[in-house]
Image: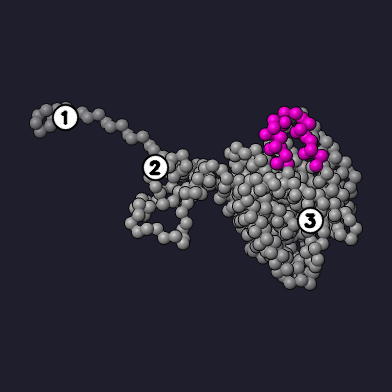
Amino acid sequence: MPSSRTGRPPVQRAARPAPPRTARDNPLRHLRTRARKAWDRPLTAYYLILGGSMLITVLGLVMVYSASQITALQLSLPGSFFFRKQFLAALIGGALLFAASRMPVRLHRALAYPILAAAVFSMALVQVPGIGMSVNGNRNWISLGGSFQIQPSEFGKLALVLWGADLIARKQDRKLLTQWKHMLVPLVPVAFLLLGLIMLGGDMGTAIILTAILFGLLWLAGAPTRLFAGVLSVAALIGVILIRTSPNRMARLACIGATEPKAGAADCWQAVHGIYALASGGIFGSGLGASVEKWGQLPEAHTDFIFAITGEELGLAGTLSVLALFAALGYAGIRVAGRTEDPFVRYAAGGVTTWIIAQAVINIGAVLGLLPIAGVPLPLFSYGGSALLPTMFAIGLLIAFARDEPGARAALAMRQPRFGRKRAAGSRAERVPRRWNTMRRRAPVARSSGER
């Protein structure tokens, strides 16, 4: 054994144990931890709803301008004709969104019955000769003069959400939802009244969305399985009868999964060319404005099939971005409905989320050839002011509900204005560094800014 300079044997030192690896030593775990903390912030739903809806609307305006130019020129109209109308509708819808986001919950509940009465009256007015108009075989429009038209059935969706949420919330407060008759009456009869007025005009797509909203409200209200299955069976039976008695609907059903046009009543021209547009886009698309299918090959390129033009011009990256925005919007709506203690907010947020996501799934599924073409627009994205206005008001509802959460309300109250008011020089707010804290781990000292 070697000896040291002093002649003594060297001391054998025990090896120190390696320090435990923390989240900072693992970049992936650290990133996941930070993402989880950011996801749990009380304002996450607020920013997802506001940012996601604005991005979808802006991207929709761009795609409406690109997809509608050729159609406008074929009708001897300026190339930006449809874009200008959609932009005007977006401005009005933005004002409705802002107003709805600032309204208190009690005012939303007070508007439920007037909106329902106005929707029923206008939907009945459509059937009056000389007032109602037929577009693409569906009599669901009222002319406002010139090129402006309105589709009252779109406002029927908003009416059912608000009125149904208020009705179920009041019955829950009185503990009446344990009885099946209070669960169904008058919610189901009024919903069937709206469905009947819609089907008088032949609009099967809007009727499907309204049925989805009804089932969403019943599910949120805790309807028993037998009751839920019974209502679903009746609706399915009525749907089968309506489809079997209409050659047009049978032809649309036969075009599911079609890859080439057919001869006969079910020519599947629109469905097939929608697939062609998506297939020719590739990963990053042919470029904005460079679509080929919009040159008369694909009908309704700027309305029901705008998702196909998006896939052709922006590619798989563009379509996945749209899907991600709708997924974020749906998650935020479910989060708002799940975290609130107010029954009306829960039912209204769930109804709006069901409406938007169901309509997006039906539209995109039809473009992909997975569902029959129902003739419903992509929410916030397709051309159509009648669909855009009530949808943006509904988004304002979600924003108001997200702002009204206890944690979000406290976080918004802590925020300091970035412009306008000057802070005192040398104040404590300037000396304390700015940090990002969750509501559950807020330091006791004052901060210049709170939750973001």
Q: Which residue is mark 3?
A: 151
In what element is the residue under mark 3?
loop
Q: Which residue is drawn at the image coordinates 73% and 41% (left, top)?
A: 164
First in residue order: circle 3 vs circle 2: 3
First in residue order: circle 1 vs circle 2: 1
| Residue 58 part of the magenta segment | no
Q: Which residues are magenta?
A: 164-190
- Nearer to us: label 3 or label 2: 2
Question: What's the distance in space between the residues labelled 3 and 2, CA to CA?
Answer: 54 Å
First in residue order: circle 1 vs circle 3: 1
Q: Residue furthest left?
A: 6
Question: In screen coordinates, is 231 left or right of 33?
Answer: right
Q: Which residue is mark 2?
A: 444
Q: Which residue is mark 1?
A: 10
Residue 172 coordinates in the image, percent (x, y): 69, 34
Q: Callout 2 environment at 10 Å: few (<14), some (14 to 19), or many (20+)? A: few
Residue 173 coordinates in the image, percent (x, y): 67, 34
- Nearer to us: label 1 or label 2: 2
Question: In screen coordinates, is 339 left or right of 221?
Answer: left
Residue type at the position of mark 1: Pro
Residue 406 coordinates in the image, percent (x, y): 54, 42
In what element is the residue under mark 1?
loop
Residue type at the position of mark 2: Pro
Kindly indicate whether the residue at mark 3 contacts the one at mark 1 (C-beta within 8 angstroms): no
Residue 425: image quadrant is bottom left
Residue 324 coordinates in the image, percent (x, y): 61, 49
